[in-house]
Amino acid sequence: MVLFSPDTQGPLRHVALFRKYAAGAELNLSVALARLGLRTAFLTRLGDDEFGHHILSCMRAEGLDTSLVRLDPTRSTAVYFKEYRPLGDTCVYYYRRGSAASALGPEDLDPSWLEGARLVHLTGITPALSESCHLLCLRMLEAAREMGVPVSFDPNVRLKLVPREEVPRLMEPFMRQCRLLLLNEAELDLLFGTTDPGVAAPRAFEWGVEVLAVKRGARGGVALTGRGEVVSREGFRPARVVDPVGAGDGFDAGFVYGYLMGWPLERCLNLANLVGASATAVPGDYEGYPFRHEIDAYLGPPAAGC
Ligand code: KDG
């Protein structure tokens, strides 16, 4: 989506100036992974309009593989607005119904694209956009299983897109087939009926999840594995917090990166917290994410063998 972020706080009806960014949970994660040095392809559709071309140039500038992006001349690129509320929370408004991305469908996936892929990442936002997007995500799950590619999944529950009572049914197939399940405490509560990761984890491990990572916002995160490991790490404190949107996607990217590098859980969580916290210092979703050469200064060099 294109994001318009207001220059001033308060109700949008009084805002005169906005800045334009590219954003969206899956794009954010892709950018964060590319900045960390992974080859990252993003499958989507954009409108063949000025906003679609803006997003495409941002993707190229960030070094993403855009070969799976299609431009649709018949539909618009989705837009969303942030609103910085006087008491400090951020509200979002979507203009995305019928967007180019919402018309994605199973025909947009060629399973051979997964040859050589090390991971497929899905979020619960895409299947919530339309029935055809839902079918595409299910097809992606099936293709990943057939090709032996592990899946990471973040439910990214958006109650503006899915009614609360429909969330568990929509998310379950993805939670049952992912190897890495990344979610925040509110989502844990909604999907597992508890905010205690230790209580939720056995159910996830029964489904085949290998690692459950729970995001605790400024308090950091905790990761649990089916091998009985439980590790929690405090969050990083950015010098100033402008807007938390994008932090969850940054956390996911940092964790996924560490997982793919075979890092111990402590280091995966440290990087997850670092990338997440970096998003909060800027008004765009992903502009603050760190680059690979910057992270050792915060985490220290990896131990031998990592
Ligand atoms: O995680 C960040 C996202 O919430 C933001 O970029 C907008 O993707 C978005 C969404 O659907 O809420």
Image (spheres, rainbow, N blue to C red):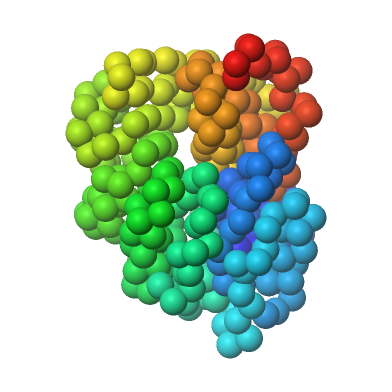
Along the viewing direction, whichever of 15 and 280 lies nearer the viewer: 280
> Which image quarter holds the N terminus?
bottom right
To which quarter of the image does residue 67 belong?
bottom right
> Which image quarter holds the C terminus?
top right
Rendering coords of residue 42 (x, y %):
59, 58
Rendering coords of residue 305 (x, y %):
60, 16
To which quarter of the image does residue 176 belong?
top left
Along the viewing direction, whichever of 306 and 167 lies nearer the viewer: 306
Q: Residue at x 39, y 48 (%)?
A: 148
> Is 160 situated left or right of 240 in this image?
left
Rendering coords of residue 47 (x, y %):
63, 77
Residue 305 against residue 187 in the figure, above or below: above
Residue 151 against residue 65 in the figure, above or below: above
Along the viewing direction, whichever of 150 and 211 lies nearer the viewer: 150
To which quarter of the image does residue 134 belong?
bottom left
Residue 74 against residue 150 in the figure, above or below: below
Q: Residue at x 22, y 55 (%)?
A: 169
Residue 95 visible, this angle: no
> Is 300 situated left or right of 133 in this image?
right
Residue 182 visible, this angle: yes
Residue 162 against residue 180 in the figure, above or below: below
Q: Residue at x 51, y 56 (%)?
A: 115
Q: Residue at x 22, y 39 (%)?
A: 207
Rendering coords of residue 144 (x, y %):
40, 54
> Is 104 situated left or right of 38 in this image?
left
Count of numbered tags: 0
